[in-house]
Image (spheres, rainbow, N blue to C red):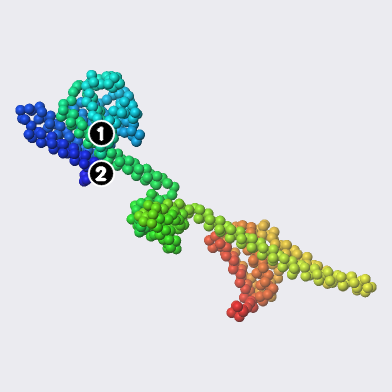
Amino acid sequence: MSGGCPEASTCEELATLRQRVAELEARVAVCDREDTPRCDEAQELARIERDLVAGLSGARTSEEALDLSMEAAMAVAGMECAGVYLLDEAGNVWLASAKGLSDEFVRGVAYYDRDSPHGRLVHTGQPLFLRREEFPLGMLQQCEPEGLIALAGLPVCHDGKVVGWMNVGSRQVSSFSPWTKDALIAIAAQIGGTLLRIQAEEARARSEAEFRNLFENMPDTVFVVDRQARILFVNRGVRDVPPAKLVGTSGFAHIKPEYLPACREAFARALQGELSSVVIEDIYGVWWDCRLLPVPRSPQAERVLVICADITAQKAAEERAHRDALRLKRVLDMHERDRHMTACEIHDSLAQPLVAAQMSLEAALQRVRQGHFEGPEGFEEAAELLRRVIAEANRLMAGLRPSILDDFGLEAAIDSLVNEGPPPSGSHIEYSFQLDVERLVAPLETAVFRIVQEALHNIRRHSGSPRARVMIRQQGDRVHLDIEDFGVGFDPARVPA
């Protein structure tokens, strides 16, 4: 670990260990050169503890720190095996790491309840240095198959509180020198802070990874922005824009201008600690239903979490439904106009001539009853009226849905309208039909047919035009119908407002 320690207590513990190394090195400097073994032992202890200080300062994982601590303790005591226990929140003791021990032995000593003899021993916080003959019966039964003849039990502390326990054992060395005991106690006492610091960093890294994994796998797109709406994080890109190109830019820069006022208002409410929402369309053509959450939730929110659900497909469906509703309304309006037109046709073309025929017949019958029979001439007028009514009825029925429209299509049906009956003297109707499809849907064909039929009927009856033009053409998914005459008409400017 370069730089300073993240926790002051951990720094203090490493400083204490460094101070002990300095004291050992001072002892080496002034030791009696005639007592060479003692000087060599002090020098080796100083080297081991110095290496441990450097190792713990750079340790990045709890496994690495535990391994370094056990290696140092084993080297100090000249022993072959070690294990480190940690405490859970309930105070139970579990084996976090072990070296030089058989799998069977490790399984047997992997966990102790807080209230078990071993658990109570750990919580005393007192170091133990035992030879084989000093082992309690339960410990002897566990250690004998493993061949252990000496065992040191050392509390691992942090801020004066026991957070773990280190055991160091040997199958060959049966005792501990005073210097060795001091060194083991010092090592165990000083690694607690480092272990907790590393565990806290690992927990934070796991939490961040889980947090990021959660956001990256959410179905929604999640933004984190600061008070200036600058994007600090986004869990995925938008369309073809990757997250790296979004981060650092203003969130407002990606929103269509017409939605910016509503978006700014929702963002301002979020900065005041309120939950807000807004529906917007971005410049990439994506519709979003956005929920804005202040972080923290207070009037001094430093960040805003924006959770955006892509509702583009929903918007498209709504637009299609809206268009379908308008289309249906137009069809219904068209049917209503047809009914009204049919009623007018019946009134003008059938009802009035029938009334006239009725009156003519009644007049003739009255004359016959009075003995004034004038021969068949008296009925000729009524017969002529009835013939006209029958012809008009046939025309009206054909106009409602002519068989030629079903049998031959719209082009032939319009052609029949253009050419039906003798045109007014000197008149000429130009006709152009340019559609890319053979047939239209039945309601649309009927609508076009009826419009042309009524327009030509009015041209023939009222315009006095020498010529007229009917043009039907397709433009994209639309049908354009142009009907034009060159008759008397009227001046739109002279129509009263």
The residue closer to the viewer here, 10 or 54, is 10
Q: Name the residue: 5% across, 28% down.
A: 34
Q: Name the residue type under label 1.
A: Val
- Where does the image place residue 366, in percent across and percent down from the top left? 90, 72
User: Residue 266: which numbered mark, if any?
Assistant: none
- From mark 1 to mark 2, how far is it between C-alphas? 17 Å
- Where does the image place residue 318, in percent across and percent down from the top left? 53, 56
Q: Is mark 1 on a helix, strand or loop?
A: strand
The residue closer to the viewer here, 131 or 392, is 131
Tell me if residue 235 comes above or below residue 324 in the rendering: above
The residue carrying pointer 1 sits among few (fewer than 14), some (14 to 19) or many (20 or more) residues within 10 Å by Cα, namely many
- Which residue has dot 2 on it? 7
Q: What element carries label 2?
A: loop
Q: Name the residue: 78% across, 70% down.
A: 352
- Where does the image place residue 411, in percent across and percent down from the top left? 63, 62
Whether tag 1 and tag 2 are in contact, CB under 8 A, the answer is no
- Where does the image place residue 203, in percent across and percent down from the top left? 32, 41
Tell me if residue 482 comes above or below residue 75 in the rendering: below
| Image side of residue 20 versus residue 451, left or right | left
Q: Quadrant of the N terminus?
A: top left
User: Residue 156: which numbered mark, if any?
Assistant: 1
